Amino acid sequence: MKGIESYKSTKRNVIFIMKKNFIIVLLLLITFNTSAQKDNGKYEQYDRVYNIDIKNDSITDYITELKIKLENAKSRKDDFQIAENSLFLGLLYLKLNSHDIATDYYLSALKKFKHEKDTTYIIHTLRALSYVNSLVNNDSIAIKYSLENLHYCELVRDTFLLEKNSTNLGICYSNLNDEETAIKYFNKAMEFGEKIKDTLFLQRIYYDIGAFYEKGKEYDKAEYFYYKSLNTEKGIEKQVVIANIYYSISMISYNRKNFEKALSYIKKSIEIADSLYAYKELNTYYKMYITILVKLDKTKELMSVFNKYTDIQSKGYNAEKAEQTSRMKILYEIDKFESEIELLVAKNRLNESKLEASKNRLILAGIIIFLVITILVSTAVQYLKIKKSHKKIVEENIKLIKIEEKNIQLQNIIRKENISSAQPPADISSESKIEEMQNEDTENQNRLFSQVESLLETEKLYTNPDLNINTLAKKLNTNRTYLSRAINSVSGKSFIEFINEYRIAEAKRLLYSKESELITIDAIGNKAGFNSKATFFRVFKSIAGVTPNYFLKNARK
């Protein structure tokens, strides 16, 4: 039973995996098919533009529409759309025989397609560049683009395009009289055509090989390939290429002095060209027809043919003139539209620049306003912080004033007790004399400094603006140097810094007292011992941290 269950379980798993794989494959096929359809749809538009009829009046609208699309693509920086529209415009301008304009558009398209790495469109564009250069007899440049095209065709393994390029290369090398290279490419194309049995392609390649040999006056080979071309496809006798083949066989027969055969084939070529209204070809064929009739001395027929030739010339001229007029009209309308577009584009650019300038001005104004507001807010915050800190400084100074008043009283009491309890120094050993002398010097300095503090606090000598160290030394019965050293050693300050602290303490006391309501701040500075307002304000700010005015204002509060 277990074996049966295991078998059923395995079977179910296998069926599930098969279903899963089938669904994945189906989805991949759908995705691939959708992608292929998209690609086909993309390149179908190329075929429509390539096959457009110049006689169709809508070509003007088509070109203007493509130019608008091109400008829009440039504004969006859409490289693929820029390339595609440039290629289409090149194809249309080529139909209008504007080879230079077509070439410019092709080159622009090629650059963008290479950037986009769209190989199929690169191949189309290179083919177009090769063709337009061969039209204006730039065969060496045409060869360059065809060879590059071969490289891309090999990348995508497009054999058909490879062989079409081989045919083009054969024709170009033939025009450059490089017969060896020309026949190499012709043979390569012919082998491919025979392999795939593409009769239309074979008919064309046989004709091109025949023309190549005819140019080299190898008439047997030329005639052989011309007949192969004629026998390749039945029911296409109305094609111009067939008329050209008949004309070429007629030419070969004429050169061989076989005038009757030449006459027979020239009549066939004229019959086909006449049915197709190919006036350009008819003009050439009738010239040959007249030449043959002259050789055969057919005078009666000659007059009739000459009249037809004159009529054909007139019709061909009129048809060519009408076509040229049509092309000129189309180009004129396109140029007119382009000038209107350029004017609109210039106006749009001017408006855009004005809008951009206005936008930049608004942004700049916004930035300036933001910076001003930020600076104002920052300044206000800093001002409030400073104001708060100044108030705190005033409060601390007032506390210090009160503490100093109590300290002064306490120090006076201590000083009196120290003086009364002072004992004569005891005898010391010789080893401790140096240390004793140092200690004695320190004690003497401390004692002298205490005397200085006592004298200043009791007599308030610092309130005298003319007080100096010499005056104070005389008061204490000591010398100037010893007194300066004692003050510096004990307080860590110079004489003037030491005295200024007393003066500022006195000034703060006066500003805090009710006396400040009766006298000015300058007078308070003088009473504290300063003979200069500037010095008083500077020293007060450096020691108290605020100006006298600010201290007074907040002290009263």
Image: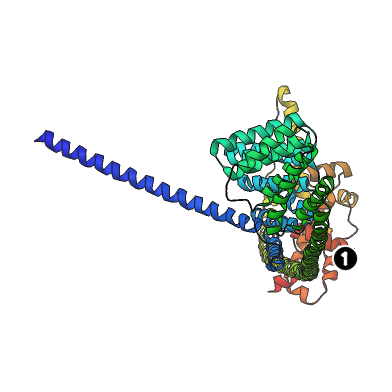
Question: Residue visible at 79% across and 41% down?
Answer: 254
Q: Going by the image, does 57 lie left or right of 11?
A: right
Q: From what the image shows, is residue 503 above or below residue 30? A: below
Query: Could you tell me if residue 463 is visible in this image?
Result: no
* Residue nearer the viewer, 377 or 548: 377
Query: Residue 439: image x %, image y %?
Result: 73, 34
Question: Residue visible at 42% across and 47% down?
Answer: 29
**Number of dots carrying numbers:** 1
Query: Could you tell me if residue 57 is visible in this image?
Result: yes
Q: Residue furthest bottom?
A: 518
Query: Residue 252: image x %, image y %?
Result: 76, 39
* Residue nearer the viewer, 502 or 497: 497
Q: From what the image shows, is residue 518 above or below residue 300? A: below
Query: Residue 472: image x %, image y %?
Result: 86, 51
Picture quadrant of residue 181: top right
What is the quadrant of the C terminus in the image? bottom right
Q: Going by the image, does 452 lie left or right of 78?
A: right
Q: Amino acid at mark 1?
A: Lys
Question: Residue visible at 67% across and 48% down?
Answer: 242
Q: Residue furthest left?
A: 1
Q: Residue furthest top?
A: 431
Picture quadrant of residue 262: top right
Q: Mark 1 sits on what residue? A: 533
* Residue nearer the viewer, 305 or 65: 305
